[in-house]
Image (tube, grey):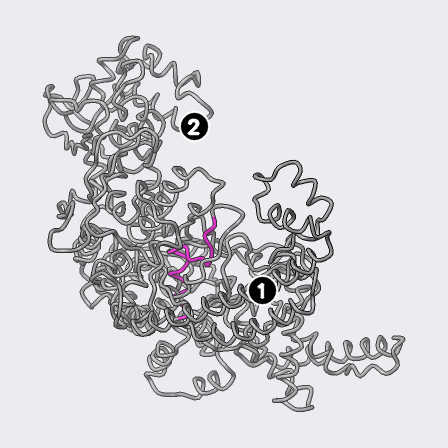
Amino acid sequence: MLLTCLVLWRSGADSTARAGGADPPSDPTAISFERDVRPILKEHCFHCHGEEPRLKSGLDLRFVRTMLDGGLTGEAIVPGDRDGSFLWHRIDADEMPPGDAKLSSDQKATIAAWIDAGAPILRPEPDEIPPPGEMVLTQEDAGFWSFQPIRRPEVPRIDGDDAPLVRTPIDAFLLDRLQAEGLSFGPEADRATFIRRASMDLLGLPPTPEEVAAFLADDQPDAVERLIDRLLESPHYGERWARHWMDVAGYADSDGYTLADPVRPWAYRYRDYLIRAFNADRPWDELIVEQLAGDELVAPPYEQLGPEDLDRLIATGFLRMAPDGTADREVDPVVARNDAVAETIKVVSTAFLGLTVGCAQCHSHRYDPISHEDYFAFRALFEPALDVSDWKLPNARLISLWTDADREQAKLAAEALAQVNKERAAAINDLVNRTLEEELEAAPEELRQPLREARDLKPSDRSEEQVELLRTYPRVLVTPGNVSLYDAKAYNEITGEFAKRTAAVEPKRPPDNYVHALTEVPGKVPTTHLFLRGDPNQPAEAVDPGELTILTVATGSPDIPIDDPDLPTTGRRLAYARHLTGGEHPLVARVLVNRAWMHHFGRGLVASTGDFGFLGDRPSHPKLLDWLADDFMQEGWTLKRLHRLIMTSTAYRQASTRRPDLDAIDPENVLLGRQNVRRLEAETVRDAILAAAGTLNPEPFGPPVPVAPDEAGRIIVGKDNRDSAGRPSKADQSLGDAALRRTLYVQIRRTMPLGLTESFDPPDLSPSCPQRDSSTVAPQSLMLMNNPFVLEQSEAMADRVIASAGDAPEARVRLAWQLAFARSPDAEQVAGALDYLDRQRATLADQLKSEDDAETEADPDRLALASFCHALLCSNGFLYVD
């Protein structure tokens, strides 16, 4: 078994800490092997020269000592002399590394400067060099910020004029950094801006004009706190924040992987579980355990389940969200199975660790200290449930929720249906026999028996004479399949009668009811093998389940069983989930609070929310991140409390207005001297349009509303009316009010993204989306201007305004403005809107007069208002939150 060594390099065969024999650099910024050169070689060279059991050219580049020892061509470096160093010549000539990926000019310059400086190292190298194939962890690896234990820092003390700005500890940490730059917070956002911001953040829906008016009139000092509490109690809160986690989980209502993209009809239960969990403010330590190992908390067989146990099984749908092509007979089953496991590992590791563990699938991670063996130890946590040697197809993983009564009822219904089918077959056979006799009567008497005998034989058993006889009298070949051609009336009477009887029996069968879950086979404990270069056809040594080695340096290794004797399952995932939520893990709480922060400020304290590794961004406020992570755990892992903490802070309440003094020092607003302007996400754009139009159907939960291509090939919310060749027909695709439900409830097909949302950066489900892009491109405007759904909702919004505001044009303008922007227009805006309506009304009236249809009942006033509403829905004021 390969091992990963933590080498602290505190002792070595040489008493010096510099390859050239001098003292180590006293300047902490001076160039060194460990800090500057080793990461470059690890990225480009270690996979051939150190991290594989067999060294290319006999050269090990993991240590300066082994470079000096050299390989088949002699020593690799000559300290102080780049021109005399074979390694430099190969790098400078772009001969190493081989292939297309070459070192950048900056990387080359670093290596050249390091050799010329005498190849300095920070500390003595170990007495015994680990053999090739063993990844080495250095002090730099172990000391990386995200691998350190979470320690609660002291809250900074803010004195002077800024002291009253400290509403929560968040403000103190942010002000401490701002003051160091001679800055402070910006002005507070006005109340209309704040309620729209808060409502969009927590509900994903704009506030109603009545809600805005009530908040503006609330002069109590705790108005903001009560507003946030009210929003958090809304059932729409769970819908909004479940959608965020569905990105991370890679939620989809289809398997993906191939263009066939089979539907997952029961995946929606996981979505509904999340909504209920967020609304109930379930602690996240519990949710993590349930999503990773809920089945291990429920005793099999999974029957007669209570609500709590049912939710635990549903929660494991998290581990079933990755693309899964194993049901497709056209793909290589070995590849498809291993891909499904690999994609699941990517989902889990980015969701809870914020690390790109999947990069170590074929070789040790080129940037982060994650070995190839680490990857398979991590995989071993899940392999008892995702056993590639005894794979379950997606439908075989479904768990029926039928009760004993349901099963008995289904049995009786099946027996009744079987009896109906038996009697139907008998009736049709009687018709066949009667028809046969009639056809035989038409043949000469001496041929009737030979014809009967020839007909009753299998075609392969008939003699040439019999074949010829039947060719002469083919009508005796009457069968249940063709008897309708002989006597259509009698056949239709039989089938019609039995169709009624079948229709009467089928409803007696309980409807199917399944859970899309992940479970283990009791008593089966597969062995995980490391795959050479990630190839499943090249299994190597066995690997035990475990945590990533680098994450055990500070907190110790968790006790992960091979097979827990006290559980019907192996207990691996359960032990690991409890390790993650035990309060000592360096990553989980940091990753979770950072994501919540991102959704409130548009950018995480760690900007790369899915990558806390070496290539990820460093935290802008590391002490604040650790304080939040520790507070989150200490106060019960509750997300709603975290919302309150963030949203009641002065930092969150700031206006988004840019300031010259802030832009001069912090143009990207990393220090948060103002709030950020954020664009609505794809789903929220559609939901906000429906809310403004007053057509939003608030029905929660249940199977997804289907999507399908329309005649133009656009993916819409509607019935699939394609024929057997996949061509859309002109059949009605309408779903009525169901088509107006929140986008959360619209089917997510990996191969058919909803056309309305596709321009607004929907989540990339390959396999999951830890962080969405937010682009501003021309197709977004074109889609909003021309999309039939947006045009229909603009008319519905106009009808809503007319019904509520009456005939007065100014009242209509004010209400439409409030519905779109959650604020009242000023006098100039009203005047401009009225002028627009007048001009549109006149133009439309002229157009209607010129139309051939003299009996048209189109109302120019209504059409002008619809055009105005359309303009509002297409505006930046609607698409962005200040």
Q: Is residue 182 above or below residue 686?
A: above
Point 68% across, 78% down: residue: 833
Q: Nearer the viewer, mark 2 or mark 1?
A: 1
| Residue 633 as seen in the image, left or right of residue 756 | left
Instruction: From the viewer's perspective, tell me whether residue 470 is left or right of residue 48.
Output: right
Callout 2 touching callout 1 (CB < 8 Å): no
Q: Which label's residue is closer to the chain start, 2 or 1? A: 2
Q: CA distance from mark 2 to mark 1?
A: 84 Å
Point out residue 699 in the picture as x, y percentages from the top left corner: 47, 77
**Residue 187: in sight, yes or no?**
no
- Residue at 54 percent across and 67 percent down: it is 424
- SS at mark 2 in the image: loop
- The quarter of the picture where residue 229 lies is bottom left
Residue at image position (67%, 58%) is 728
In the rendered structure, find residue 430 and report the number of the disc placed on it: 1
* Front residue of this view, candidates 763 and 206: 763
Identified by mark 1, the residue type is Asp
Identified by mark 2, the residue type is Ser
Residue 798 drawn at (x, y percent): 66, 80
Q: Considering the whole magenta stretch, tell me its main secondary structure.
A: helix
For label 2, count other residues whose C-alpha is less than 10 Å away and answer few (under 14), some (14-19) or many (20+).
few
Q: Which residue is mark 2?
A: 104
Residue farthest along the front direction in this orientation: 446
Q: Is residue 660 magenta?
A: no
Residue stretch rendered in magenta on the structure: 239-256
